[in-house]
Amino acid sequence: MTQPRRYTITLLLILFLAGGLRLGLVSFQSDQLQQDRDAYIAIAENLAAGNGFSSSNRAQETEIRPTAFRPPLYPCLLSVIYYLKAGSIGVGVVQIILGLLTVWFTWKTGRQLQLGGAALMAAAIVATDPILLQYTTYAMTEVLAACLTSLLLYLLVTSMSAAPASSETGARVPLFFWTGLVWGLAILCRPTYLAFFGIWLVFRCANALLLRFRSLKTDLFERGEVKQLAVLAAGIMLAVSPWVIRNLLVFHSPILSTTHGGYTLLLGNNPVFYKEVVQQPWGAVWSGESLHAWQKSLEQDIAQSDPPIKTEQERDRWMYQRAKHYIAAQPDLFVQSCLLRLKRFWNISPLTSSTITSHSIFSWGIAGYYTMILIGCLGGLFLVTWKREKGWGPLIWLLFSFTLVHLFYWTNMRMRAPLVPAIALLSVYGWSHAARFFKFGAATNEADLNRPKG
């Protein structure tokens, strides 16, 4: 059997494994696909029924109120499924397909980064990642976000890892446009991708400025680079413009992300959270009873505010101001909560019980799995930075931007689901170089032992 054929068979087996694991979980936990934790299903059902982007329940409320509290991409995807009357079965099928696409594009990105056979290992990590497996059975954004990350990284690495010749610049314009379009869709799935774009653009400009300074050129970008960035920006704007225009018409405000940010910031920065979690030993979680009581008191404060708070934008601004007040009042606890969120974001084992992690054997297995993966990822980050591997830049800034955002906003392990493709690729890069180092060391020792004496 030739090497290419073995390689293809291995890839197919990994895809089969990814599909089989997800199909098994969706089959055994199909009831979880009907749970509407973040109101995505409610919005999707309203869209499918022609009631617009709203989470209002027509059976319980007399008025359908538009909302911008949740990002639009995932509920719009679900609305197609519910319009076709596919229900939770259709949601499960789509989740499985998204998982398979994530594995596929991770492998493609690994090939583009010259990982060779190690790209298969990165695909295998994504195929078996516990976070992605668990959230395949929930109607939430984790699986879609990871899929968009894998596609976005593939497009970014393909279009920007190597400087093309001037004759190829025009041919690459469509690729930059599609990159921007996917980036815009990712922003509509999770607003954190907007921070990724901002940070990536800042460091790209800083790098261009440094290169121009060294070469004593006056222009920050070459003409081809300006065209590439303009086309990429056009793709992003095309993707996000329907959402911005809708919000401008409905709320008289060009909302680019959501009206959810203030609540998420306040959720992780308030005296009750500080007392029940931040000032407690590691592993403490905010109990459901206490959280519900805090949410109820929050609504009471909003109801008693003067002037009255009537719109989602006003609620969002009020919560931002309340969070800033608490941060300024207790800066030491805010710093502690930031460090806690950093540990939670990069934790190796979930802090709360779930279907998968309800038994200690699963908890220990997941902890061991992520320990190995994250050690490799840390080594990969060090190596690509030390060796100045240009093509790996998008992966580094993706990890940095998500980590930075979640230092301040509410965080747990599932928030890093969109980073799984990048983590897998960096981990494989780190471990593959470690394997070469130990192999070289073993070969050197063997040569020393076999060297003639005297």
Image (cartoon, rainbow, N blue to C red):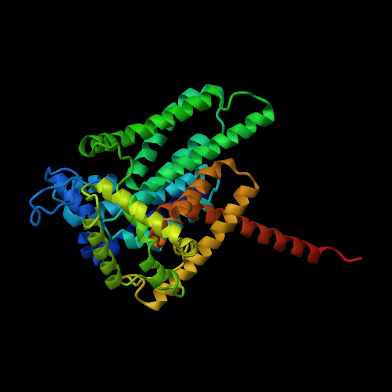
Q: Residue 334: x and y, percent?
A: 46, 61
Residue at the spot 50% in from the left edge and 43% down from the top edge: 394
**In the rendered image of this protein, does residue 373 appear above or below residue 385?**
below
**In the rendered image of this protein, does residue 379 appear above or below residue 233?**
below
**Which picture quadrant has residue 174?**
top left
Q: Is residue 43 left or right of residue 100?
A: left
Q: Nearer the viewer, residue 246 or 177?
A: 246
**Which picture quadrant has residue 216?**
top right
Q: Is residue 383 left or right of residue 364?
A: right
Q: Nearer the viewer, residue 432 or 229?
A: 229
Screen quadrant of the C terminus: bottom right
**Which picture quadrant has residue 203?**
top right
Residue at the spot 30% in from the left edge and 68% down from the top edge: 291
Q: Residue furthest right?
A: 454
Q: Is residue 251 left or right of residue 186?
A: left
Q: Residue furthest front?
A: 306
Q: Residue 162: x and y, percent?
A: 56, 35
Residue 377 visible in the snapshot: yes
**In the rendered image of this protein, does residue 301 appear above or below residue 47?**
below
Q: Nearer the viewer, residue 116 or 392?
A: 392
Q: Residue 166: x and y, percent?
A: 55, 23
Q: Residue furthest bottom?
A: 360
Q: Nearer the viewer, residue 454 or 169?
A: 169
Q: Residue 125: x and y, percent?
A: 45, 58
